Amino acid sequence: MKISFKATILYSLPFILTVIAAFGFDILNSLDLFYGYLLIAIFTFFIPVAVFCSPYALYFFILSKLNKISKMGAVIAFVFTMIGFIGIIVGVEKLYKPIEQKLYFNEQTTIELEKRSLKRFKMDTGLEGEIKNSKPISRKGSWDEGDMSGIEERKYTFIVVTRDSSKQFVKRQYTFTYKYGGWSGV
């Protein structure tokens, strides 16, 4: 059975457009939205999943009514479209942390936020400080940390201590939050 180029385009158009939109919007935000959808779906009898899938089912139903594809072809196309989405989601899931690390927790960001933390420490205490520890907190949280949503704010925490501990030992924690395209905080 040979599938024509036109049929291939008709079958794959919804999948391609959705993937382009997800990557164009922001793949990490799209993934967060999808996870939120799944979380809500677990507690609402999968109604949001049906709402998400209904435009694709409608598209293939209309194609079958216009006799562009058979009803069985519409069902197969719909199933493969959903399998394709699951494949993209699994792939992005595996790449989420490395992508987030490069985009939000890179070396330039770390240096900038360290400087802001040290400057704030000097303003607060009047003493020179040094970074003892830094911890990036991914937007994709984990369920075992007590946050049942699985989605957190993207944060970067720095612990600053006095450089010369013979004078006085002071320890401060400064947390920056990524919102609206920039790091806010101290």
Image: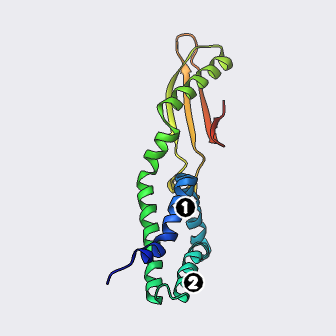
Residue 168 in the image: state x and y as whole percent.
58, 14
Q: Which residue is mark 2?
A: 62
Image point (49%, 45%), residue name: 100
Q: State the quadrant of the N terminus.
A: bottom left
Image point (53%, 83%), residue name: 63
Q: CA distance from mark 2 to mark 1?
A: 29 Å
Q: Which residue is mark 1?
A: 35
Q: Amino acid at mark 2?
A: Ile
Horizontal side of residue 14 vs 94, given as left or right: right
Residue 34 vertical position relative to residue 28 in the rendered view, above or below: below
Residue 111 in the image: state x and y as whole percent.
52, 26
Bin the neighbour count of mark 2 within 10 Å (Cα to Cα): few under 14, some 14-19, many 20 and up. Answer: some
In the image, farthest residue toward the left: 1
Residue 46 visible in this rendered orientation of the protein: no
Q: Amino acid at mark 1?
A: Tyr
Residue 132 in the image: state x and y as whole percent.
49, 25
Question: Pointer 2 and pointer 1: residues touching (CB < 8 Å)?
Answer: no
Image point (59%, 65%), residue name: 37
Residue 164 vertical position relative to residue 150 in the rendered view, above or below: above
